[in-house]
Each structure stands twice: as C-alpha cells, then as structure tokens.
Amino acid sequence: MTSPDNKVHRILCVVGARPNFMKMAPIMAALSALGPRVEPKLVHTGQHYDVAMNHQYFQALGIPDPDINLEVGSGSHAQQTAEVMRRFEPALDEVAPAAVLVVGDVNSTIACALVAAKKGVPVIHVEAGLRSFDRAMPEEINRVLTDQLSDLLFTTEESGRANLLKEGIADERIHFVGNVMIDTLRLNLPRAVPAARIAADAGRTGFADNGYAVLTLHRPSNVDDAAVLQGLLETAAQISLRTPVIFPLHPRTRATIERFGLAHLLDRPQMLLLPPQGYLEMLGLMQDAKVVLTDSGGIQEETTALGTPCITLRHNTERPITVDEGTNTIAGNEPARILAAYEEVMTGGGKAGRVPRFWDGLAAERIAAIVNDWLPRD
C-alpha cells in the first residue's frame, strides 16, 4: 500500500510570454529538486508566437521542453485570453494537478488562473501584489484579478504584501520570497554575451567600445501613438549624438515605426538597430551600458540588480522598489524629462542604488520549500 507521503503532486506551471521564461526556469528547477513527491509539468500557451525566439530562450535558460503546447498565437487581448482558456481546460482535466502555478501578468496568467479557479484547482501566483495603479495598462487588470483568484501568493518586494492586504487578501496566503528573475540573472551572468561581440556580429565592430546606451520600447502607450513614438525616437536620436544607442527592436515596435513613416529617425550613424535579442545577449547589453532607457518592467528590475542606471519611459511603475532602493528613475515619455534624466546620469553617474532584500538568487528555493509544506500530506 502506498504511503500518503509518497503521493505524487503534479504542479502545472504555465508560461506564455518571454518574460515568463526567465521567471519559470529557476522555479521548475527548484520544484524538481524536491524529489518524487512533487512533479512539475510545463505548459506553454504560445502567447508569444515567435517559435525561433521561444526556442532560443528555452535553450539559453536550460528550460525543459514543454509537456503541453497550446499554440494559441496572436490576437486581441480578449481573443487571446479566451483562446488560452479554451485550450487550457482540457489540459487541466488531463493532468489533474494539485495546483496551477502562474507567473507575472500576461494574458496567459489570468486565463489559466481563471480556468483553474473555476474548476476548484488551487492557484499559485509568483510575482503577486505588484501594482502600477494604472487601470489603462492591460497587465494591471491581469495582476489584480489573478491575485484575487490565488490561494498562495509570492511577492518580490514588501510593497506587494501591503497592496494585497489592502485588497482583502488574507495575510497567511502571502509570502515574501524575493525575485525569481534575479535568480536567473545571477545564474546566467557569467554567460552573458558582451556588447562588443553583439555589435561585431551586426557588422559594427567597435560601436560599443567607448560606452553606449540601450533603448527598448514595446508598450502600447509608447508605440501606438504616432506623436509619442516620434518624440521618443527623436529623443533617442539626440542622445545618440553623445552616447551611441543600441536599440533591439520589438517586432511590434518595428511595425508601428514603419506604419507611421518614422524609420528615417533611426537612420543615424550612432544608432545600432538590432533584431530581438536572446536572454544572454540582453544581459550583456544591460550589464555594460552607461544607461538603459526602457518601458519594460522586467528590465527595471534587472538593471537594479546589475547596478546599471535605468530611465523608465513610463509615468508609473508597478515595481517601486527599483526607484526607492534601486537605480531606476521614472521619466515618462516627454522628451524634456527624458533628456534631463539622461543628463543627470551622464554628469552624476546616476543613482547608486542597492540590491533589494531577497534578490539573492534563492527566491525559487524559498518558493519550492513553501509549496512543499503547503501541499497536503494525506
């Protein structure tokens, strides 16, 4: 007769978009290390539908091939969320997991959490409690709703607990464990691809030798408005007169630049346009940059961990610790404010910052230990 302690508890771990991959890699490893009692299963919804890029990230991070591929692809927020729900339900029924673990705030996060909750399957949310307090952001809706559906909530910073308590989440369900994305960063930093090699591979040997800035843009508020996008590109061009700018172009951003007829603004000798980069390449670019200008939430955290000055091209952040303790400055998307923040970095070196508590590479191990204790023994 099988002992109750020998029962296998399957945890269905969901990824959908590239930011999820960096967060899930250490979680899968930590859950697998618990032994035969816990069996993580990986579901890839296919929300980010660039097959080559997905494979590149999986290989770089050592993530096992997904057990289940939903292959949802692109669509509007409603279409994508609905299609993930439709395809995830039979997978959930087939695996019959002890819990569904979701990370972050993408459409796959809320879609799979909602299906699980409606079917009575416990939901675990990693990176819970982050709030921009901007309901115009689709991710903010996903964050708030996923937290309300979750049974176990893991936070990356102390503000997360405060936000969750204000929203009526019971304190015993909330656990401050640190940042799993920084687990991945610390593990892979020795393998980061130097910017000099990236520039050379792009046919621009020597481009990054005397310092450079990195620019990333993908938020709808920045790239879907022609006037805003034009202002940001003109600002980047102005910065490039003093500091060479490396700009990995998100496919959606490239498409809107072409649609709005703004490509000429990027035709500058001191601007290096790149296709989307792999994880190890982005690590190398951020590590040695004089400054990073971005609208990405994850990059705000990574630059704080690396000690690289960051200028966030948004009016708010759901990651306030990167401002309060880290290297991040909120500049919005107005050229004058961005240039002022850039000038401050160039003349004063930017904010010194410090690495926040529990951003120590052990967050996934804390999560696995708590999940192991939380799972029933009978």
Image: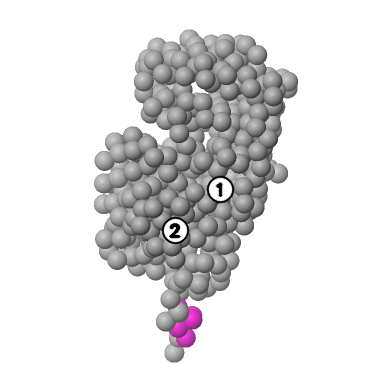
The answer to whether residue 242 is visible is yes
Q: Is residue 277 above or below residue 224?
A: below
Q: Is residue 373 above or below residue 338?
A: below
Quadrant showing the N terminus: bottom left
Question: Seen in the image, is 246 located left or right of residue 153?
Answer: right
Say which residue label 1 marks: 181
Q: Say what amino acid the circle numbered 2 marks.
A: Leu
Callouts 1 and 2 close, C-beta under 8 Å: no
SS assignment for the magenta stretch, majority:
helix
Give how far across and how far down residue 118 sits, in percent: 26, 60
List the single residue furthest toward the bottom: 1
Residue at 53% in and 50% down: 157
User: The magenta stretch spans which residues?
Assistant: 3-7
Residue at 30% in and 42% down: 80
Q: Residues within 10 Å of mark 1 (few under 14, many from 20)?
A: many
Q: Say what amino acid the circle numbered 1 marks.
A: Met
Closer to the camera: disc 1 or disc 2?
A: 2
Q: Earlier in the sequence, mark 1 or mark 2?
A: 2
Give how far across and how far down residue 287 sits, in percent: 66, 35
Residue at 44% in and 58% down: 153
Q: Is residue 314 covered in magenta?
A: no
Name the element at disc 1: helix
The answer to whether residue 41 is visible is no
Say which residue label 2 marks: 153
